[in-house]
Image (spheres, helix red, strand yellow):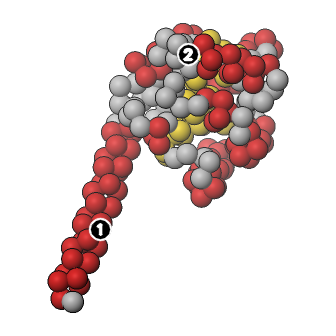
Amino acid sequence: MKSLYFLFLIVVCSFITACDSNKSKIKNTIEQMQSAQIVIPYDKLDCWTSDSLKKISPWKNAKLKLVHYIDSTQCSSCYLVKKQVLEPLLNLEEESNNQFCNIFIVHPGNNSRNWKVLTNNYKHKSTPTTLFIDSLHIFMDKNPNLPKEVMFHTFLLDEKNSVVFVGNPFNVNIRNKTIAIIKHKLSNSNKD
């Protein structure tokens, strides 16, 4: 019985150590992301949007930007067609008078099926109205501090393009926290 208890104790300690190690790794990764400004090479990305919106380009002057980077390892259509989940963040653009903007950067890779599905979903308005297509993988090349892990591919930028917050908005707690941070930062900037 003592040996069973001892084995259980070892397993619990190993689990706690692994969790602490994982939290430390995540914290270090986010600190690395925050150590350099993010470059969004708008002029090198293909912008899918209306001509009138392209002319205004609200994303260039927004004080806060939520970057959603979807690379070829992810199902871009799976992410983008979940507009109902992203709706509160999309509505926040209008509410903030374009001081906040969602930036969807999609790297569909060389898979013709990915391109076909993406194009079809965009034509049928199943995706957000503005997408930046990064067919040459320029975004990641310009931002070597960004990790390859998908969990770090959605992040909030301030007016200097510094990472403020990292997290996937499909998690309701992360989405609510992201919205709270955006509202707080915009209300503080409007007081100045």
Q: Is residue 31 above or below residue 2?
A: above
Instruction: Specify whether 19 is left or right of 159.
Output: left
Q: Camera-side residue: 160 or 106?
A: 106
Q: Camera-side residue: 26 or 41?
A: 26
Q: Secondary structure at mark 2?
A: loop
Residue 98 point in image, percent of width and height: 72, 33
- Which mark identifies residue 111? 2
Q: Is residue 66 above or below residue 115?
A: below
Instruction: Specify whether 157 is left or right of 99.
Output: left
Quadrant assignment for the N terminus: bottom left
Please tell me which of labels 1 and 2 falls first in the chain: 1
Q: Secondary structure at mark 1?
A: helix
Q: Is residue 158 visible?
A: no
Q: Is residue 4 above or below residue 94?
A: below
Q: Camera-side residue: 84 or 185?
A: 84
| Amino acid at dot 1 | Ile
Instruction: Specify whether 20 is left or right of 134.
Output: left
Q: Is residue 39 visible?
A: yes
| Amino acid at dot 2 | Asn
Q: Residue at x 74, y 39 (%)?
A: 83
Q: Residue at x 33, y 61 (%)?
A: 19
Quadrant assignment for the C terminus: top right
Residue 144 point in image, percent of width and height: 35, 25
- Which mark identifies residue 16? 1
Residue 166 point in image, percent of width and height: 49, 45
Could you tell me how many numbered marks the image carries?
2
